[in-house]
Image (spheres, coloured by chain):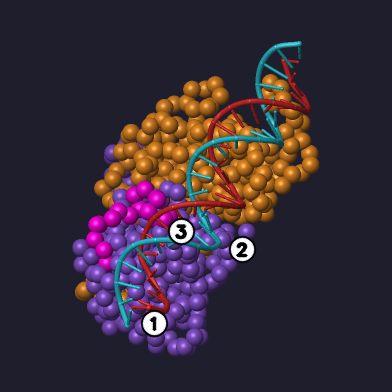
Chain colours: A orange, B purple, C cyan, D red
DNA sequence: GAAATAGTGTCTTTCAGACAGTATGTG
DNA sequence: CACATACTGTCTGAAAGACACTATTTC
């Protein structure tokens, strides 16, 4: 019912609520700050990365956190606030931003999630093609692309599809997330073992975002959002392997992608070079016009019953 | 990064933080009211119904709206707020509430969605077994179960949240069926379906909730949440048919449900009576322990790509 | 030329959907 | 008894997964 004047929640609060609603002074309302936080995923050198900022002040000073900020009350929608924050943080212009997929992930409002005051944050999930090195968002804060495998994440919920959020009392423990991340295929540099903690409840938000991403590329063509305008089937397979964290059968994947109507369409051109150590030049494709994959690409079986 | 009012700022972890907190006044922040609104679905006489309340004052006086209310800042989580509102509105006790499935649907915060002030609402989706007639939430507001087919809903947005399978298309089944409820103070008591307007942006929220419900019963056993503790396969099929709005092949559905591990388990008993006009007594089942259906029940094709 | 790689052909298994067909109830 | 209804068998087609194979490029 959305802010209902005669709304009689909780016994006595009734009249008070009615009274101050009559005054229509927003400042009289239960003070809750509303922010947006963005889980921005991209692939860099075949490894899944997330955009993070380093906190310059308490709480969680020095820790990494999701980029985000306050929603401008009454002047922008939640989607607009998220797009604005993403642009500020990445330095993307409007044109580039169009190639980025942005969707709402969920809201998080456990009491105490911010020690300073009640804050409800609306989390967003973004899929971006490889972007230039991050710059701080105008202010002094450092921003960087961090391999997802380096993060200490909360264990995903058993019911994986869309876990809205967790009950209270669950801190940021999340200690035991196994290093089962795809980032292991990182070329060269040994990735720090899933140990980097995140501020606030951002470990949970990121875990939920990854769950969503893994599910979403199953039945939508959004994996193409991680690539440039033209790409090869092999590059597309790399997206799936990085996000799902498991290798896929090259031949079957190839045939499957081409068989789903509207997923990709050929450009007629071929890649400039063959494979790294030989092989024919791959054909190039661009994203098709399908918005859902039919039938879907199923990810390989995994635990869970 | 969540709420970082003054970007930089440093200081010893503890002292700095304390000072910071002391100097901090929540009222300095953009004030946005945060509410929860609940899309509660149930089946009554085989027809999908939604719980609505009638608004007693402006704006949208006399219109129907989703039940909900303010989140108690700092004293409850969003999930708790939704559960509390649902309990208040339905009169369910804690025990009954456990049989109700409740999950976060999404947040809505367009400027102007409430003419009085900036309000962000966190919408929830609930699946409930057949419940007693709704009572107002303690106050004078009328609450009622309304057939979903009677509502004027926004067209589902093709790309929106996450409708696996099927794309946009089909409104609400419209088909509606026979039984009508007392809730029919709605205009057009006859076949004039899909005409009852909702307050605020609640038509969009309900449309999103229905999309989610249709998708969710595909790959989770949550259809059982609409039934009692024991049910027949035929009743379960009725849930799918009501929510998807299309008839399913009885024989294939039966075999499919029994073949999915953990979906249902037999109680050994049979229904008291056979079919309405004859037939054997159906076996009874209860919900199994699976949280995901593997493989999923796919809803029948329906054009659109 | 050796080796790796892009892409295709084919077989097996699974599973959805379309029919049956059988047993068990109700009127 | 007539007939609806719960449930089961069987066939067909679609599609996923496992190989095996050809063609093309790099070193």
Distance between mark 1 and mark 2 Cα atoms: 29 Å
Q: Are marks 2 and 3 in contact (CB under 8 Å)?
A: no
The residue under label 3 is: B252
**Which of pointers 1 and 3 lies earlier in the amino acid sequence?**
1
Query: Up-down: is A163 above or below B207?
Result: above
Chain letter of disc 2?
Answer: B
Cα gap from disc 1 to disc 3, whole angstroms: 28 Å
Mark 2 or 3: the one toward you: 3
Secondary structure, mark 2, is: loop
Q: In percent of the image, x 58 and y 51: which residue is there?
A: A295
Q: Quadrant of residue A232?
A: top right
- Mark 2 Cα-neighbour bin, 10 Å: few <14, some 14–19, many ≥20: few
Give the numbered dot on residue B179.
1
Which residue position holds label 2? B303
Q: Position of residue A152 (x, y in %)?
A: 39, 35
Residue A29 position within the rendered picture, expressed as x and y whole percent measured from the top left: 34, 68
Q: Quadrant of residue D18?
A: top right
**Left or right, B149 with reference to B143:** right
Q: Quadrant of residue A55?
A: top left
- Label 1 neighbourhood size at 10 Å, few (<14), some (14-19), many (20+)? few
**Chain part drawn in magenta:** B255-271
The secondary element bearing badge 3 is classed as helix
Q: Closer to the camera, A164 or B166? A: B166
Residue at x 21%, y 74% (from the top left corner): A12
Q: Residues within 10 Å of mark 3 (few under 14, many from 20)?
A: few
Q: Nearer the viewer, residue C11 or A91?
A: C11
Q: Are marks 1 and 2 on the same chain?
A: yes
Which one is earlier in the sequence, the residue at label 1 or at label 2? Answer: 1
- Of badges 1 and 3, the one in the foreground is 3
- Chain ID for label 3? B
Please report, as a chain letter, where disc 1 is located. Answer: B
């Amino acid at each position: 019912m959305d802010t209902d004047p005669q709304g009689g929640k909780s016994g006595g609060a009734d009249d008070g609520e009615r009274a101050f609603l009559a005054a229509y002074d927003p400042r009289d309302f239960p003070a809750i700050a509303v922010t947006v936080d963005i889980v921005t995923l991209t692939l860099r050198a075949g490894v899944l990365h997330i955009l993070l900022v380093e906190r310059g002040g308490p709480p969680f000073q020095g820790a990494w956190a999701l980029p985000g900020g306050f929603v401008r009350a009454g002047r922008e929608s939640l989607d607009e606030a998220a797009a604005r924050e993403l642009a500020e943080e990445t330095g993307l212009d409007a044109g580039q931003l169009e190639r980025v997929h942005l969707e709402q992930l969920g809201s998080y409002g456990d009491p105490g999630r911010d020690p300073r005051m009640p804050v409800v944050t609306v989390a967003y999930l973004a899929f971006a093609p490889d972007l230039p090195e991050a710059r701080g968002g105008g202010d002094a804060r450092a921003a960087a692309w961090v391999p997802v495998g380096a993060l200490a994440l909360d264990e995903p919920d058993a019911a994986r599809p869309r876990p809205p959020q967790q009950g209270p009392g669950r801190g940021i423990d999340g200690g035991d997330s196994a290093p089962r991340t795809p980032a292991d295929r990182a070329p060269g540099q040994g990735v720090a073992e899933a140990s980097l903690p995140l501020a606030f409840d951002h470990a949970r938000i990121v875990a939920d975002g990854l769950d969503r991403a893994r599910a979403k590329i199953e039945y939508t063509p959004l994996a193409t959002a991680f690539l440039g305008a033209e790409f090869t089937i092999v590059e597309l397979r790399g997206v799936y392997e990085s996000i799902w964290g498991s290798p896929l059968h090259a031949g079957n994947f190839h045939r499957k992608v081409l068989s789903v109507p509207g997923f990709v369409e050929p450009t007629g051109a071929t890649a400039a070079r063959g494979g790294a150590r030989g092989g024919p030049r791959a054909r190039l494709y661009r994203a098709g016009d399908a918005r859902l994959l039919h039938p879907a690409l199923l990810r390989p079986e995994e635990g869970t019953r």
